[in-house]
Every structure is written in C-alpha cells, then in structure tokens.
Image (spheres, rainbow, N blue to C red):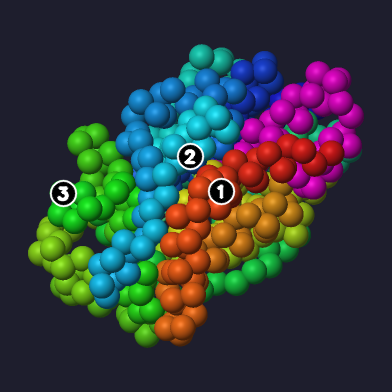
Amino acid sequence: MSNGVLIIGAGPVGSITGLALAQAGIPVTVLEALAETPTAHRAATTHASTLDVLDTIGLSDEIVRQSIVARYFQYRYRRTNEIFAEFDFDRLAGETNHPYAVQLEQHKTVAIALEAAKAFPHFKLHRLHNAVELTQDGNGVRLVTETPDGAKHDWKGAYLVACDGGRSFARKVCGIDFPGFTYEERFMIVATLFDFEAADRFKYRNYIADSERWSSVFKIPGPDGKGMWRTLLPIMAGESDEECTTDKWIHERFAEILPYAKDTPIVHKNLYNVHQRVASSFSHGRVFLAGDSAHINNPLGGMGMNSGIQDGVNLARKIIQVTRGEADVSVFDRYDRQRRPLAQKYVQAQSIQNKETLQAKDPEAANKRFDELRKTAEDPVRHKAFLMNSSLVAMWRESEAIT
Ligand SMILES: Cc1cc2nc3c(=O)[nH]c(=O)nc-3n(C[C@H](O)[C@H](O)[C@H](O)COP(=O)(O)OP(=O)(O)OC[C@H]3O[C@@H](n4cnc5c(N)ncnc54)[C@H](O)[C@@H]3O)c2cc1C
C-alpha cells in the first residue's frame, strides 16, 4: 500500500490541497480528466480568509500580485440607480493579513498553485485521466482511470481526496447523498471591456437589486491583465437557451439594467445552472470530499471556491498529522465536524440570503431588506460584523475552534 495521497481533479481545490500535502513531503498524485484548466468564467473573488489560509502555503503573494484588489463592494437599486449600501474591507484591518478581497480568474489561481507544485518531484499531475472506478479497504484506496485511448490505469494511495466538482464521481461511488435544491432560473455570465467604473461610480464588486432584472457587476484582470468586466444576468424559467445566448438578448438586458453599456461588444458569455447542496458526509472511510464535490452554492458573495480551498487546506493538515504519526485517524471525524455544518451555516445561508436580497419581489419586504443593509453599512459595529461573515473570516475561525 502506498503512503501517498490520490486526488481526483486539478481545479482550484485539488491543486491547492495537493500543493499543501506535497510541501509536507507527502507523495501526491492528481488525476485530472481534462487536458487543460478551463478558462470559462467561474470564481473571480478570493476573500481575506482564504488569502490568510494561502499565506500558510506561500501562495497569497503571487495571487495578490496578479489580482485586482477590491477594497469596497456596493449595492444599488436598478430602478433608481441609488447606491444604498457600500462596504469597506479596510474595516477588517487587524483581523486579517489581507483586509480586502481580490479579483482573479480561478484558472489563474490554479496555474499559480500548479506552478508552485513543480518544486516538488513527488507531486505528480496526470491529465486526460478520467476516474472510473474507486474501491477501498482498511489499508488504502484503489482508483482506476481511463485515458482517451481506452486504456485503464491503476492507482493506489493511503487516502483519496475527491476534488472532482459538483457532479463528483467519488461522492456517487461512496453513496453519499447531496441534498439541497436547484434554482429554476439559470445564470448567464457576460464579459465585456466596458469600463463601468468610469461610467457610473461602480466599485470592482457591485450588486444591483431588482425584483426581476437583478444583476452583479465585477471587474477581473482579463486575459491581458488590463481589466475586463463581468456581469451576471438571471435567466428566468421559460427563457430559452437559444434566445438568451444571443447578443441581442444580452444587449436588451443591458439596456434595462446597465443602459450606458447597452451596445458594448460581448467578449464572452456562459450559461450556468445554479444549485444549493451540501453532501450528507464529507468522508467515507479513506475517501474525503473537498470543494464543490462537498458543497455547491450560487455565486453571489463569491464563496464556493473560497470555502472549498479552506476545506482542502484543513484536510491536508490532518492527513499530514496522521501520516507523521502526530495524530490518530479520529482527526478525520473532526474534518467533517469542522467543515460540514459551517458550510450550511455560512456559505449556504449567506449565498441564499444574497440572492433573496437582490431579487426580493414584494416591495415591502424588499424595502425592509435594503433598509437593513443600509443600516448595517452605516453602523461601524454591524458593518464590521457583516464583513467578518461575508469574507468568511468568521467561518474559518469558528471552524478551527471546533474540537
Ligand atoms: C459563474 C460562477 C462564478 C463563481 N464565482 C465564484 C467566486 O467569485 N468565488 C468563489 O469562491 N467561488 C465562485 N464560484 C464557485 C467556484 O467556481 C467553484 O466553487 C470552484 O470551481 C470549485 O473548485 P473545485 O476544485 O472544487 O471544483 P472544480 O473547479 O469543478 O474542479 C473539478 C475538477 O475535477 C475534474 N474532474 C471531474 N470529474 C473527474 C473525473 N471523474 N476524473 C478526473 N477528473 C475529474 C474536472 O475536470 C475539474 O478540473 C463561481 C462559480 C460560477 C459557476
């Protein structure tokens, strides 16, 4: 039996978990189905808590260097264009090494982690290996992957970390439920080069509230690092993919929500289904779930990748302790205790709340929520408490305190 760790998936969670293990001298084999990391627009925001965690494995400096630093985020009404609440991460000074969020496309975070992992010859990444069989016994795990030529390959490890995303093959093989729900609406991500900051007081992270046509607008570095803006548009049940993916439909939505950008060329677009689900267990024997294989949520608030990276680093520390004989295997139960309930308490609760705030249908309920946010932003104590939650600093601390 190998004392190494197998990881399925070289997304942000698999790459970073693998790096953390390799830095401790543990042999790591990452099996990834795809030839390259996809560049489709997914995570862009990395929060203070995650940067603090990434400090411990030496990744934050390069991530911050390549990112756009986003000190503020704001909420506005679509109908009046009034900015009703603005939050300033600088209020977290003293609570984190990084009192800001950073904006960086997740494929660049993956590239930074994989580049750092090259320093460790015992970190091996095998692409075009699709995991197809998984078994385990008291001594270890056995994984079979299939390559495009149809050949099967056998891998053995002491443990397996399933970082294989929301449709996780490993979660299904282990028979772990994934309860929750899928929204009727889908989300369309549209990228443009239109400069929203110059056009109308936008910060680098912005939410636009409206009962029908709510939205969010974020700045990311873009392929050349010179800046690109990403807009999220909800696609209502009944609106077809064919219709919504046309530039005409997108320009009509821009005319309603962001009129100054109504004719701007569309650089990229992508349609997503959106779910809220947490696995019923984060482990099964020697197999552990981390990241989207363990929990998925809507992207409002930017928490999926962040909490996933935090799962991965937390779990890597436990595998290191057990491998070195510094802890017994009961620490693995702590992984589930530390991460699963808090995925519900923070990530699920806040992402659902964020969506409900933006799209509140009943005008009275909407006004109440907006008023609440305005008061939160105006009150220094509540402002800071709100940021502690939305940056997941509170979640990380609470999770680490669970014995
Ligand atoms: C539009 C959008 C915006 C988002 N914005 C944010 C944000 O700002 N901040 C944030 O924190 N999160 C955000 N997220 C969520 C974030 O993208 C995910 O949480 C993150 O990608 C999870 O990383 P992961 O490594 O767990 O899974 P993934 O990124 O899904 O990676 C899984 C990997 O496993 C591989 N794989 C799957 N099955 C197999 C198999 N059988 N064999 C081998 N390999 C396999 C896949 O090819 C893939 O490379 C956003 C998501 C979307 C859709």
Q: Residues within 10 Å of mark 3 (few under 14, many from 20)?
A: few
Q: Amino acid at mark 1?
A: Val
Question: Marks 2 and 1, Cα distance to the nearest angstrom?
Answer: 10 Å
**Which residue in the protein does label 2 denote?**
91
| Relative to 21, 138 lies left or right | right
Is 264 magenta? The answer is no
Which residue occupies the extreme front position in the image? 379
Question: Marks 3 and 1, Cα distance to the nearest angstrom?
Answer: 31 Å
What element does badge 2 sit on? helix
Which residue is at 39% across, 58% downward?
85
Q: Amino acid at mark 2?
A: Arg
Residue 282 or 34: which is nearer the viewer? 282
Image quadrant for the N terminus? top right
What element does badge 3 sit on? helix
Q: Marks 3 and 1: which is nearer the front? A: 1
Q: Amino acid at mark 3?
A: Ala
Is 323 magenta? The answer is yes
> Residue 377: x and y, percent?
45, 55
Q: Which residues are magenta?
A: 309-338
Which residue is at 31% across, 61% downward?
83
- Who comes first in sequence, dot 2 or dot 3? 2
| Relative to 297, 41 lies left or right | left
Looking at the rendering, which quadrant does residue 17 occupy? Answer: top right
Residue 69 or 185: which is nearer the viewer? 69
Labelled disc at residue 381 = 1
**Which residue in the protein does label 3 denote?**
198
Does the residue at mark 2 contact the one at mark 1 (Cβ under 8 Å)? no
State whether residue 30 appears in this view.
Answer: no
Question: Marks 2 and 3, Cα distance to the nearest angstrom?
Answer: 25 Å
Which residue is at 74% across, 54% downward?
341
